[in-house]
Image (spheres, rainbow, N blue to C red):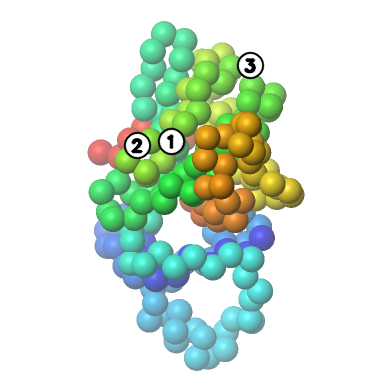
Amino acid sequence: MNIRLYNARILTMEPGREVFYGEIWVKNDKIAYVAEQKELAEEWDRSQFPRIAWDIELDCKGNLLMPGFYISREDGDVITYDLRTRKPNAGDYMDNATMHSLEHMFATYIRNSEMGNEVVYFGPMGCQTGFYLLVRNSRSPKEVFAMTKEVLRQIYDHKGEVFGKSAIECGHYENLSLAAAKAEAATYLAVLEEQTNMDFTYPE
């Protein structure tokens, strides 16, 4: 799977490096290339890159890429995970169809996974920048992180209709889009593959 994110403001974890405009290329679920727009243009002019057949190309429209996977809180034996797909208050929000579709797909896959019995809840944030996943603490955060990535891969590889796409199962089934769910899953998976914060704490 080849994904191109372009027209993005990018914030890396490199000390001292400021936010810059550029592109991120993802190949086989791994970030393969990150570059400023000017650097990329120069490389293309020198024909340093072969032409790539992209599975997904996403115009980030100048928005800052800084989502992640975090522990939001712990209540008794339940851990609330913050699956933050978009940077808060940056003007880039999931539309209703994307949020609705990913909710159907992710909830179904994770409830039918090997940790399905430990899943308490999965649902979207009202602010349209991510989802909350509540899981019993019998599963470690690293296990939940790994399962989150696996579910995102399953969504991208899914064949057929969105789960629950019928009037009997959903109150707004015409608002479901598998393409929207796949695009959001692929973008978020690319970020999680590069996440190095394995304590899953919020940035200070």
Q: Are marks 1 and 2 in contact (CB under 8 Å)?
A: yes
Q: Give the residue drawn at x 56%, y 47%.
A: 174
Between 16 and 31, which is closer to the camera in this rendering? 31
Residue corresponding to mark 3: 117
Q: Residue furthest top?
A: 76
Q: Residue furthest bottom?
A: 45
Q: Look at the image and tell me whether residue 198 can be seen.
A: yes
Residue corresponding to mark 2: 126
Q: Quadrant of the C terminus?
A: top left
Snapshot quadrant of residue 53: bottom right
Q: Give the residue drawn at x 50%, y 23%.
A: 121
Picture coordinates of residue 61, whole percent (x, y): 36, 67
Secondary-structure class at tag 3: helix
Secondary-structure class at tag 1: strand
Q: Is residue 127 above or below residue 50?
A: above
Secondary-structure class at tag 2: loop
